[in-house]
């Protein structure tokens, strides 16, 4: 059985960051609509027939800023999910949190409801850079957020950290990293700031570091993370022993997931019919809430010719890749269809030889080149 996860989208935040291309919307003064929890549970009921009898191995509550959700709403949501879905008692359940919205009572309530992992969007520990990024918190609040999470009982904490920020020097990037590692999180998501379409930064680009400097930031950061016991297991993910993200690994291993909430999407394998479905929900929160659960959901079948690229796009992000047999088991395609491409990449020293689909160290550095081989 292909593993199954659940993603829950909370689309509101206090303030939209200029680099953010996620489906997030500034929260109005009256707060978010309490009917949103009802809508989330309606989405579950609509999707349940497609995943009947399958167990949820992980849940991720993302946004936006889901740490704005009131404990009573979160309690109603978690109770409803447990009523409609079969959730593994040992499931990893993550919530994203913005340091600028930290509330000790909220964190404690989330933990008491069974949420056992928290992902804190620190991004930088330099107040100058936080201001340029449009963040609503300062460095001291980021440090406090980790402390509050620990006090609430969280023993699985991720910190998001960005580098290659506007006008950032190598010393500043490494100082941020050292500062985050000093907080001793169990996992660090360390990723480069990029200018995504339909963002303020894309329209009005800030002065970013030159590519040579970015490479130095990256390589020096990797070395320091390794020295502190953080294993680099995915392009932007570093975990202490036993603390790789179960939820994100399921994406990268081409597992299944259902998505609920405004703009959420999902991937569901219909194993009896040997086909893969994509689900997509109405994106804008106001329109999402106006429509019925059936009206706001779109389901399409993935074209078989797109599957090799989609599969590789995910699994090759993992440094160790996946077993070779995953390709046929999770796409229902014959491996012979990509044999020649695999052989060519192996001959170039970009893919490993053996029983796993994985890049070499060289291939990991030139991942876009590897992936381009699978675009038809």
Image (tube, helix red, strand yellow):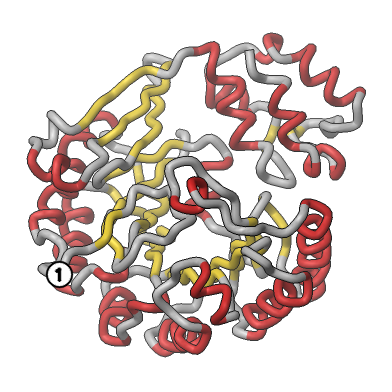
Where 30 falls versus 334 (above or below)?
A: below
Position of the N terminus by quadrant? top left
Left/right placement of residue 308 relative to residue 54 reads right
Disc 1 packing (10 Å; few <14; some 14–19; many ≥20): few
Q: Where in the figure is residue 353, as x and y percent of width and height?
A: 86, 30
Evaluate whether residue 18 shows in this view. Answer: yes
Q: Residue at x 56, y 52 (%)?
A: 205
Q: Where in the figure is residue 115, as x and y percent of width and height?
A: 35, 68
Residue nearest the viewer, comparing 76 with 49? 76
Position of the C terminus by quadrant? top right
Where 376 falls versus 149 (above or below)?
A: above
Left/right placement of residue 87 relative to residue 288 reads right
Q: Quadrant of residue 374?
A: top right
Residue nearest the viewer, comparing 77 with 361? 361
Q: Which residue is mark 1?
A: 29
Residue nearest the viewer, comparing 81 with 218? 218
Q: Where in the figure is residue 285, as x and y percent of width and height?
A: 19, 47
Q: Quadrant of residue 237?
A: bottom right
Q: Residue at x 62, y 78 (%)?
A: 180
Q: Residue at x 38, y 30 (%)?
A: 268
């Amino acid at each position: 059985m292909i593993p199954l996860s659940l993603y829950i989208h909370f689309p509101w935040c206090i303030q939209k960051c200029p680099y953010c291309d996620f489906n997030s919307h500034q929260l109005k003064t009256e707060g978010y609509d309490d009917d949103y929890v009802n809508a989330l549970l309606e989405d579950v009921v609509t999707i349940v027939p497609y995943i009947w009898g399958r167990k949820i191995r992980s849940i991720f509550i993302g946004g936006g800023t889901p740490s704005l959700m009131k404990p009573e709403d979160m309690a109603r949501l978690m109770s409803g999910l447990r009523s409609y879905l079969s959730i593994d008692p040992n499931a990893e359940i993550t919530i994203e949190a913005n340091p600028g919205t930290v509330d000790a009572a909220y964190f404690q309530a989330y933990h008491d409801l069974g949420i056992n992992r928290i992902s804190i969007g620190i991004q930088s520990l330099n107040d100058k850079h936080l201001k340029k990024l449009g963040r609503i918190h300062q460095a001291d609040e980021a440090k406090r957020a980790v402390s509050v999470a620990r006090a609430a009982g969280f023993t699985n904490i991720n910190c998001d950290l960005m580098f290659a920020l506007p006008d950032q020097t190598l010393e500043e990037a490494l100082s941020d990293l050292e500062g985050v590692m000093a907080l001793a999180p169990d996992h660090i998501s360390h990723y480069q700031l990029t200018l995504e379409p339909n963002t303020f930064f894309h329209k009005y680009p800030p002065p970013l570091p030159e590519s040579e400097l970015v490479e130095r930031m990256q390589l020096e950061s990797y070395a320091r993370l390794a020295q502190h016991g953080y294993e680099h297991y995915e392009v932007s993910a570093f975990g202490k022993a036993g603390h790789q993200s179960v939820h994100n690994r399921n994406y990268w291993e081409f597992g299944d997931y259902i998505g609920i909430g405004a703009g959420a999407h999902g991937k569901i394998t219909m194993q009896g019919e040997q086909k893969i479905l994509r689900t997509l929900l109405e994106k804008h929160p106001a329109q999402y809430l106006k429509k019925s659960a059936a009206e706001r959901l779109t389901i399409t079948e993935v074209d078989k010719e797109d599957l090799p690229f989609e599969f590789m796009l995910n699994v090759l992000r993992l440094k160790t890749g996946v077993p070779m047999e995953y390709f046929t088991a999770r796409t229902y395609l014959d491996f012979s269809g990509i044999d020649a491409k695999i052989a060519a990449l192996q001959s170039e020293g970009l893919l490993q030889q053996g029983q796993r689909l994985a890049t070499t160290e060289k291939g990991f550095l030139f991942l876009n080149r590897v992936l381009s081989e699978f675009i038809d």
